[in-house]
Image (cartoon, helix red, strand yellow):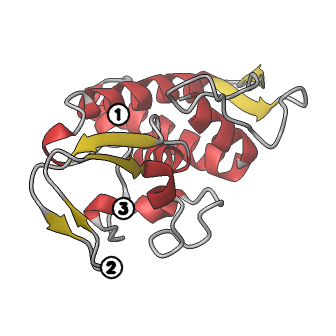
Amino acid sequence: MMYTLYELSKNPDIQEKVRKEVQREVKNAGSLNYDAVKGMEFLEQCVKETMRKYPPVPMLLRVCTKSYTLPNGLTIEPGQPLQVSVYSLHYNPSYYPEPEKYKPERFDPDQTIPSCAYIPFGNGPRICIAMRFAMLQMKYCLAKLLLTYKFQVSPKTREPLRYSVKSFFTAPADPILFNVSKLEK
């Protein structure tokens, strides 16, 4: 959620578009409830794009279960440990043109992304079992915040962002600070 707020702060036009969607869906549903959150498609695109740029875990660890030969002739044998670079996949320009840019429209329902090119929660039989709950929770909390507040990156935030080398997760090395202002009703 922090990285989504960071990206929305860096892109105020996108932040305003998300806010309008949140306000519309809350008005249609009567309150900020499950149905309202479910209808927030652009907010979901923003969360997905954030998770592409800042995958929670930049590397997946797996063990090969059956012999597999790569196109270059290298064979991976059963029992061999593997490291899958989520970060490398998510920044591959073949899948994501201009990968450094924050473009939520990449996840528009009309767009097609190969299944193994987007794996912030893993993939296959080891995919995160809490994926849907995590997405719902992030969308709800972001919607709640965006209904009431406007976010801007504080000048005290060190940029460009750096990642902590002490964490297994994609954690910032320095605090990400925001200037938060309450919206007028």
- Is residue 4 in sight in this rendering? yes
Residue that lies at the very extreme toward the right in this rendered image = 155
Task: Report the front residue among 184 and 69.
Answer: 69
Residue 185 against residue 162 in the figure, above or below: above
- Where is residue 92? Give x, y as percent: 51, 67
Residue at the location (37% across, 23% down)?
A: 31
Q: Label 1 to label 2, Cα distance in Å?
A: 37 Å
Amino acid residing under circle 3: Ala
Q: Which numbered marker is on residue 126?
A: none
Q: Label 3 to label 1, Cα distance in Å?
A: 18 Å
- Where is residue 140? Give x, y as percent: 41, 26
Q: Of callouts 2 and 3, which one flags the residue occurring earlier in the amino acid sequence?
A: 2
Amino acid residing under circle 1: Met
Q: Which numbered marker is on residue 135?
A: 1
Question: In the picture, which quadrant includes the C terminus?
Answer: top right
- Where is residue 42? Give x, y as percent: 45, 50
Q: Is residue 92 left or right of residue 154?
A: left
Q: Of callouts 3 and 1, which one flags the residue occurring earlier in the amino acid sequence?
A: 3
Instruction: Kindly indicate the quadrant of the structure image that contains residue 113.
Output: bottom left
Q: Which numbered marker is on residue 117?
A: 3
State the SS at label 1: helix
Q: Of callouts 1 and 2, which one flags the residue occurring earlier in the amino acid sequence?
A: 2
Within 10 angstroms of label 3, few (less than 14), some, or many (20 or more) residues?
Answer: some
Q: Which residue is mark 2?
A: 72
2 or 3: mark nearer the eye: 2
State the SS at label 3: helix
Within 10 angstroms of label 1, few (less than 14), some, or many (20 or more) residues?
Answer: some
Residue that lies at the very extreme toward the left in this rendered image = 66
1 or 2: mark nearer the eye: 2
Residue at the location (46% across, 64% down)?
A: 106
